[in-house]
Amino acid sequence: MIDLICKSNHSDECYRNYLEKNLSIGFGQLREVEYEKVEFSKPSLVILSPTLEIDELEITKLTEKLISLLENINQYRKRYAVIHADKNSYIIGGYILDPINQLRKSPDNDYKYNLKTDILQPIVSLPNTVVSFGLAIG
């Protein structure tokens, strides 16, 4: 039987433990870290602004560009989201796989990519609990 009683005073830690237990044991969606592949991954979710005026091929190219930018900074980010808005794209959420120490870590920051200047800029990371329940772009 799985112990679902939180023994911590921090809700983020309890929420993370709850998700890890339920997703790995209950649904098999999250593997134990030692079995996780050390590879760069695609986003789990791509969200488009309703006012975005580029076609599917351009969206695919832009998403692939963001994936390659993460590879260039050697960041093994998993289960993250990409948001394409009119002037910028964002990489948010997920977790960072540390293959050396076999750990999953919360990202230190998310990213904002400016389409015109071709610059990937670190931004303050949203807390995982916020990303899990909804998205907000300012």
Image: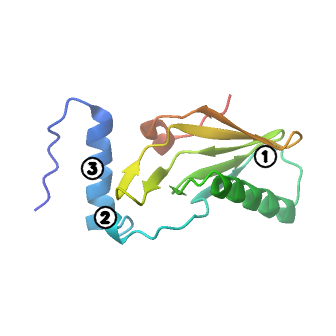
Q: Report the disc number at residue 18.
A: 3
| Coordinates of residue 52 in the picture (x, y in percent) | 84, 47
Q: Which residue is mark 2?
A: 24
Image quadrant of residue 20? Answer: bottom left
Q: Are marks 3 and 1 in contact (CB under 8 Å)?
A: no
Residue ID at (26%, 41%): 14
Q: Which residue is mark 1?
A: 50
- The answer for how far apart the CA atoms under marks 3 and 1 are is 34 Å
- The answer for how far apart the CA atoms under marks 1 and 2 are is 34 Å
Residue type, label 2: Ser
| Residue 27 in sight | no
Residue type, label 3: Tyr
Residue type, label 1: Pro
Residue ID at (27%, 49%): 18
Nearer-N-terminus badge (1/2):
2
Q: Nearer the viewer, mark 3 or mark 1?
A: 3
Q: Secondary structure at mark 1?
A: loop
72 sits to left or right of 16: right
Mark 2 neighbour class, 10 Å CA radius: few under 14, some 14 to 19, many 20 or more: few
| Coordinates of residue 48 in the picture (x, y in percent) | 73, 50
Instruction: Single out the residue that lies furthest toward the left.
Output: 1
Q: Nearer the viewer, mark 1 or mark 2?
A: 2
Q: Secondary structure at mark 2?
A: helix
Q: Secondary structure at mark 3?
A: helix
Nearer-N-terminus badge (3/1):
3
| Residue 66 in sight | yes
| Coordinates of residue 90 in the picture (x, y in percent) | 68, 43
